[in-house]
């Protein structure tokens, strides 16, 4: 199973970006999915998550600005980021929890996509 993020880039404060996460391979069913952010010199923190029922959870710092969504048929997850701030800068990682065709529950991470917000 592979997980690939895309959509990162360099933007100015106040602008928007949409990140995409695409999963592929031997996936029977997607379970929870999440976006994480790792700023330079800091730990990787949860930004937003969405479960298989579409229930979402956000870090306090992004509530009202970021929206996470998913397309189960396409095995994809999205993160719409509005009103970006310099403190949103970091590498954004996608985490995918899934059940494979052997009924095993597993987790895969993507390689990350860089988001840089200039003041």
Image: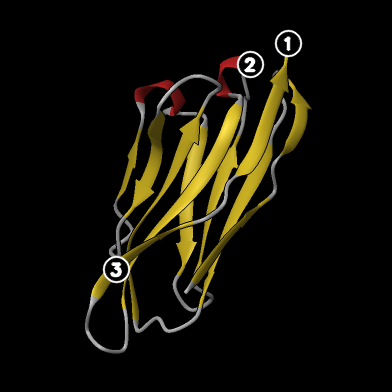
Disc nearest the viewer among 3 and 2: 3
Pointers 3 and 1 in contact (C-beta within 8 Å): no
Q: Position of residue 1 (x, y in %)?
A: 47, 74
Q: Which residue is mark 1?
A: 119
Please state if 40 lies on the left or on the right of 109 as rendered. right
Observer-nearest residue: 8 or 15?
Answer: 8
Q: Secondary structure at mark 1?
A: loop
**Disc on the earlier residue, 3 or 2:** 2
Residue 51 in which image quadrant = bottom left
- Residue at the image point whose x is 44% and y is 73% from the top: 72
Q: Is residue 76 above or below residue 38?
A: below
As rendered, which of 25 and 12 lies closer to the eye?
25
Q: Quadrant of the C terminus?
A: top right
Vertical placement of 8 versus 22: above or below?
A: above
Q: Quadrant of residue 32?
A: bottom left
Q: Mark 1 vs mark 2: which is more N-terminal?
A: 2
Q: Disc 1 and disc 2: Cα gap in Å?
A: 6 Å
- The image quadrant that residue 95 belongs to is bottom left
- How far is mark 3 from mark 2, CA to CA? 34 Å
Viewer-nearest of labels 3 and 1?
3
Question: Which residue shows up at 40% across the image and 41% down it?
Answer: 48
Give the label on residue 94, or none. Answer: none
Mark drawn on residue 86 = 2
Q: From the viewer's side, name the closer residue of 75 and 114.
A: 114
Which residue in the protein does label 3 denote? 106
Q: Badge 3 local density, few (<14 within 10 Å), some, or many (20+)?
A: some
Above/below status of 71 relative to 40: below
């Amino acid at each position: 199973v592979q997980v690939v993020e895309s959509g990162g880039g360099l933007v100015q404060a106040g602008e928007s970006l949409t990140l995409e996460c695409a999963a592929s391979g031997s996936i029977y069913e997607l379970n929870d999915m999440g976006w994480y952010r790792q700023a330079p010199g800091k730990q990787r923190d949860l930004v937003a998550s969405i479960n298989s029922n579409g229930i979402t959870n956000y870090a306090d710092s992004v509530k009202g600005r970021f929206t996470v969504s998913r397309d189960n048929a396409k095995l994809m997850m999205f993160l719409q980021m509005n009103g970006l701030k310099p403190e949103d800068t970091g590498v954004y990682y996608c985490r995918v929890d899934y059940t494979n065709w052997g009924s095993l529950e597993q987790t895969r991470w993507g390689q990350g996509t860089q988001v840089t917000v200039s003041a």
